[in-house]
């Protein structure tokens, strides 16, 4: 079946993905109306649906059903996706259809304002191998003289079929507590999910999943969307009194305005959506597959086991200390050694030096090259922490360029973590950032950058610029461009996205990075919940997860090394403890666990993930990959000392048998599916198990 079909008599478009359909139509006034998003429909069935004009809520309301990109104007009273004001003060838009074109699964529907020279194009893209539909909008000012003011320009609005009620799943959190999953009834109101921080995901992440309240992990219809943007964003979920449920979202937040110059086109980021029928698990797996196939630059490359010095040394980094850590890391089987904050300028604490990106001569008198060479000699790759968007006021950079930061006349420059944000929307600041990064990577044989951004925007002004709110878009685009250029110039370079932990995790940043630093919270018990939330959208291979020291620095909780490893093995494994204090026994156990991780890495990093729930506090993830099913199970506490029941598995062949790789025990698939896998859990709290099952041919 073709991806895209146009039925001229009804002015109906039908988009098809492998198992879903999406349909829109033009009404008599050239408004693009939503028809269907859900299970697959034939063209005839979509046509039948298109004939129905959804009823108005009342005679005081406009009829016609939800729009694909509602504008201001006419009898529309819901949240607009597009708000513009023309130079003469007129607001709102009246559409005239201006044709469509399509190629390679990409449909463009063109709409002009009936009077003003405004062209808007609705973009839809579908793929052969994914049910994810990508949508975005372009807005073009075709006037030769006058600007157009844009007050809101969303990527897309999404619409659900009419049901008695809906539930929304979303991710909230902050520093040390990212990606907490929340579920709530959709109320008859406008509910705004947003970040005004200039960064994506501390506070909330631009991912949502909607269901009618009955979906579970492995059953039920789920409609899920995610925005591919790494700056401020806003999604307005609207259930109106007549029960229509829609949401509209895109970059920017309320109060910002952008001026579209004559001849200029504004392109929004992609707002992607997927419909699945297998519950939240299937929705997550659809996202994971999409991220691998259509987002990540290097999806097929194994993420290396990394070591990062941050929790071990804080700001106290020097050549001798890092060399000692590198030697121990190499013994454990670490493949990438990353030096964190504190290697440059006067950066001996978070008070000074940010912006002065040359090695600190007291700490690295010979520069970084000897350390980089030693790390490479030990057989590891060499990584370095950078924070290119930020500056300490106490730095040579700030003293030379106080105007390079986001600021406003007559306003304080609010410091957070003693730092300010550089305005990378400025071409001179962006060029400076690219140049030093490019040189740094070149001169020190750097294989990996941990790109951090530790504070949100405040006083986000751009004095002297005619359209200062542009920086909310252009700063993020500039970050993208710098990363893209660095990758193009240094094809071996890999990048980790970090923003005070997981403050900038989204489909936009993942198009030019390889993994995300999930959270500064490395407590394994807290991590189980953080990782559960993260996995709703992102695959395990991008989820940076370290094993650190016990007691944990954030929570003071003491946990066994094995438990810490088993939790971190559910993602891209790293080690972040102070290895100089680990005993020989701990180092030996850690080396064994790293070797085990490498054995299961293909399943974790390329497999299909199933979130499993057992008895009481027991949770687990299973990764199906080729003939393997790998289970990582965690039991943080054991109320009343009760032994958890066997863990029921999923996605196995009931007619096959599976051998436990470590014990040799053979289980039948049917028993694992129906009764479960008895787990070899040690006694007491913070128990965990890893079981690698291999299907055996009968
Ligand atoms: C942020 C990161 C940490 C570490 C510090 C360094 O908090 O999330 O992992 O890199 O900055 O200052």
Image (tube, rainbow, N blue to C red):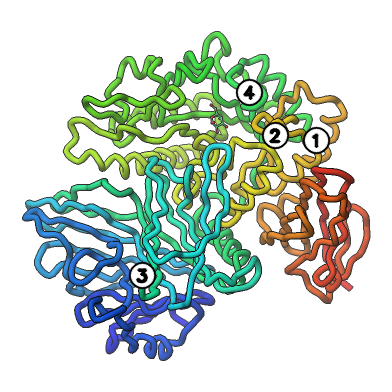
Q: Earlier in the sequence, mark 3 or mark 4?
A: 3
Residue at image mark 2:
575
Where residue 408 appears, x then y in whole percent? 25, 29
Could you tell me how far apart the alpha carbons at marks 4 and 1 are, in whole angstroms? Answer: 25 Å
Label 2–label 1 contact, CB within 8 A? yes
Could you tell me how far apart the alpha carbons at marks 4 and 2 are, in whole angstroms? Answer: 21 Å
Q: Earlier in the sequence, mark 4 or mark 2?
A: 4
Q: Residue at x 80, y 45 (%)?
A: 596
Residue at image mark 1:
590
- Label 4 or label 2, whichever lies nearer to me, is 2
Horizontal side of 390 relative to 147 (left or right) equals right
Q: Any mark on residue 240, and which?
A: 3
Q: Earlier in the sequence, mark 3 or mark 2?
A: 3
Residue at image mark 4:
373
Q: Residues within 10 Å of mark 4 (few under 14, many from 20)?
A: some
Q: Nearer the viewer, residue 342 or 468?
A: 468
Callout 1: SS:
helix
Could you tell me how far apart the alpha carbons at marks 3 and 4 are, in whole angstroms? Answer: 62 Å
Label 4–label 1 contact, CB within 8 A? no
Label 3–label 4 contact, CB within 8 A? no
Q: Quadrant of ligand 1?
A: top right
Where residue 248 appears, x then y in whole percent? 36, 62
Label 3–label 2 contact, CB within 8 A? no
């Amino acid at each position: 079946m073709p991806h895209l079909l146009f039925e001229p008599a009804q002015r109906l478009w039908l988009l098809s993905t492998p198992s879903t359909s999406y349909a829109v139509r033009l009404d008599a006034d050239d408004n693009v109306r939503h028809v269907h998003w859900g299970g697959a429909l034939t063209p005839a069935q979509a046509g039948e649906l298109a004939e129905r004009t959804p009823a108005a809520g009342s005679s005081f309301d406009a009829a016609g059903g939800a729009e694909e990109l509602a504008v201001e104007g006419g009898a529309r009273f819901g949240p607009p996706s597009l708000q513009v004001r023309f130079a003469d003060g007129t607001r709102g838009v009246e559409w005239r259809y201006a044709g469509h074109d399509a190629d390679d699964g990409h449909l463009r529907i063109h709409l002009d304002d009936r009077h003003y020279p405004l062209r808007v194009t609705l973009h839809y893209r579908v793929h052969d191998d994914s049910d994810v539909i990508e949508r975005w909008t372009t807005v073009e000012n075709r006037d030769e003289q006058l600007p157009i003011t844009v007050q809101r320009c969303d990527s897309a609005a999404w619409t659900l079929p009419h049901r008695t009620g809906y539930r929304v799943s979303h991710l909230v959190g902050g520093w040390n507590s990212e990606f907490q999953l929340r579920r709530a009834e959709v109320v008859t109101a406008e509910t705004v999910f947003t970040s005004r921080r200039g960064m994506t995901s501390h506070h909330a992440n631009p991912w949502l999943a909607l269901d009618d309240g009955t979906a579970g992990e492995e059953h039920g219809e789920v409609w899920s969307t995610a925005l591919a943007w790494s700056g401020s964003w806003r999604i307005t979920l609207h259930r109106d009194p007549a029960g229509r449920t829609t949401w509209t979202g895109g970059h920017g937040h309320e109060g910002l305005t952008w001026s579209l110059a004559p001849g200029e086109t504004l392109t929004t980021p992609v707002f992607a959506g997927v419909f699945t029928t297998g519950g939240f698990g299937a929705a997550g797996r659809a996202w994971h597959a999409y991220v691998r196939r259509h987002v990540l630059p290097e999806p097929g490359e194994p993420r290396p086991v990394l070591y990062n010095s941050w929790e071990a040394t804080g700001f106290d980094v020097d050549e001798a200390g890092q060399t000692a850590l590198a030697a121990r890391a190499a013994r454990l089987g670490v493949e990438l050694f990353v030096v964190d904050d504190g290697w440059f300028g006067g950066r001996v604490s978070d008070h000074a030096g940010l912006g002065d990106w040359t090695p600190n001569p007291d700490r690295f008198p010979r520069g970084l090259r000897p350390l980089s060479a030693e790390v490479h000699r030990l057989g590891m790759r060499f990584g370095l922490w950078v924070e290119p968007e930020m500056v300490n006021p106490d730095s040579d950079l700030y003293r030379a360029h106080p105007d390079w930061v986001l600021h406003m006349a007559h306003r304080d420059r609010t410091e957070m973590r003693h730092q300010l944000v550089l305005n990378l929307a400025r071409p001179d600041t962006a060029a400076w950032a690219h140049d030093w990064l490019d040189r740094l990577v070149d001169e020190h044989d750097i294989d990996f950058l941990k790109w951090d951004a530790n504070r949100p925007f405040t006083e986000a002004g751009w004095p002297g610029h005619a359209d200062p709110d542009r920086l909310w878009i252009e700063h993020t685009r500039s970050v993208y461009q710098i990363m893209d250029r660095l990758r193009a110039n240094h094809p071996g370079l890999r990048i980790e996205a970090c923003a005070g932990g997981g403050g900038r995790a989204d489909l936009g940043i993942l198009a030019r990075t390889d993994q995300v630093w999930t959270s500064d919270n490395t407590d394994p018990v807290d991590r189980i919940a953080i990782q559960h939330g993260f996995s709703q959208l992102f695959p395990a291979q991008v989820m940076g997860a370290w094993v650190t020291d016990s007691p944990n620095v954030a929570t003071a909780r003491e946990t066994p090394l094995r438990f810490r490893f088993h939790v971190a093995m559910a993602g891209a494994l790293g080690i972040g403890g102070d290895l100089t204090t680990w005993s020989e026994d701990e180092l030996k156990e850690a080396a064994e666990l790293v070797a085990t991780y490498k054995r299961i890495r293909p399943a974790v990093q390329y497999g299909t993930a199933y979130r499993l729930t057992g008895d009481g506090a027991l949770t687990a993830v299973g990764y199906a990959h080729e003939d393997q099913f790998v289970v990582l199970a965690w039991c943080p506490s054991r109320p009343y000392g009760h032994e958890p029941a066997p863990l029921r598995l999923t996605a196995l062949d009931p007619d096959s048998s599976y051998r436990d790789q470590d014990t040799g025990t053979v289980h039948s698939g049917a028993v694992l599916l129906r009764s479960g896998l008895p787990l070899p859990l040690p006694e007491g709290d913070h128990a965990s198990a890893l079981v690698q099952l291999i299907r055996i041919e009968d």
